Amino acid sequence: MRVSLPDADSGTLVLIRHPARLRKKRCQLGILSAIPSQHYGIFEMMPATRLSRATAHLTPTSYLVLGLIAREGPSTPYDLKRHVTATIGHFWTFPHALLYKEPARLTQLGLLTEEREAGGRRRRLFMTTVAGRQALRAWLARPAGQPTELRDLGLLQLFFADLEPATTGAIAEEQLALHRAQLAVYEAGRTAEPKGLRTTTPTVEHWRGVTLRMGLLYERAAVEFWAAVAAREPTPASAKTRGRSKGRAPGKP
């Protein structure tokens, strides 16, 4: 066995033929990850300090990309976009263009590897490294301490609708229609194949079994809320209709 001790700033190529010896050496050196290369017995060792520096530059989108690739296996940026559209996009909004930029950045940080197809469309396939899985594991071990951000334009308009009371009914009806439509999408999502995906993937199954339930609860609550507002505040059109019906006798112009 031949070993080159790593320094604190860069990885070192280490030739170790036995996995048990590799694990022992990792413990001795305080190294968190070992990335297998294409050559037998060669591992790229990433010191703990380097991994810490890499994760310091990660964003929620970074972990989203790492998580999807860890679950689905080798993926192209387009694959990531399809999964986000079918699942995560329902509760986490961000520019989808990042899905075409972030994998390359994570590759530079040593958290993903990239392979390009030799022929055809020469698609770029990204895979997680051991360091990438370690970064994802460390992130999941830190429960989010931030409160939920709620940016609801309908609620914002409702808050100021007392300045123009006649608008309240129309605001409520519009929001009620939107939430009923989204509720229908979620209801269908429990069984229907997601748009853009040929088969049900592990990510879709996980969405159905875990986070979709929260989406259903939220949309049902929103429908109930806006229906109550709409019942209290008639729209301008309905108010005019009521006024005409009350002010005129049946059959009279």
Image (cartoon, rainbow, N blue to C red):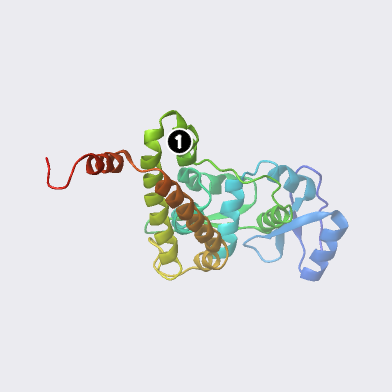
**Front residue (pair 239, 7):** 239
Does any portion of residue 113 appear in the rendered image? yes
Residue extending farthest to the right is: 28
The picture quadrant where one finds residue 237 is top left
Which residue is pictured at 85% across the width and 64% down the height? 24
Q: Where is residue 218 shown, x and y percent of the image? A: 52, 55
Q: Where is residue 121 shown, x and y percent of the image? A: 38, 56
The picture quadrant where one finds residue 20 is bottom right
Q: Is residue 198 left or right of residue 237?
A: right
Q: Which amino acid does label 1 sit on?
A: Gln
In the rendered view, tell whether residue 163 sits above or below residue 212: above
Q: Where is residue 61 shown, x and y percent of the image? A: 57, 47
Q: Is residue 43 left or right of residue 22?
A: left
Residue extending farthest to the top is: 163
The quarter in which the N terminus is drawn is: bottom right
Does any portion of residue 18 appear in the rendered image? no
Instruction: State the residue position of label 1.
Output: 157
In the rendered view, tell whether residue 246 sits above or below residue 224: above
Q: Where is residue 109 shown, x and y percent of the image? A: 64, 46
**Front residue (pair 32, 175):** 175
Which element is circle 1 on? helix
Which residue is pictured at 85% across the width and 60% down the height? 27
Mark 1 surroundings within 10 Å by alpha-carbon count, few (fewer than 14), some (14 through 19), many (20 or more): some
**Front residue (pair 245, 149):** 245
Which residue is pictured at 27% across the width and 43% down the height? 242
Counting every numbered tag in the picture gives 1
Q: In this view, does 203 lie to the left or right of 236?
A: right
The quarter in which the C terminus is drawn is: top left
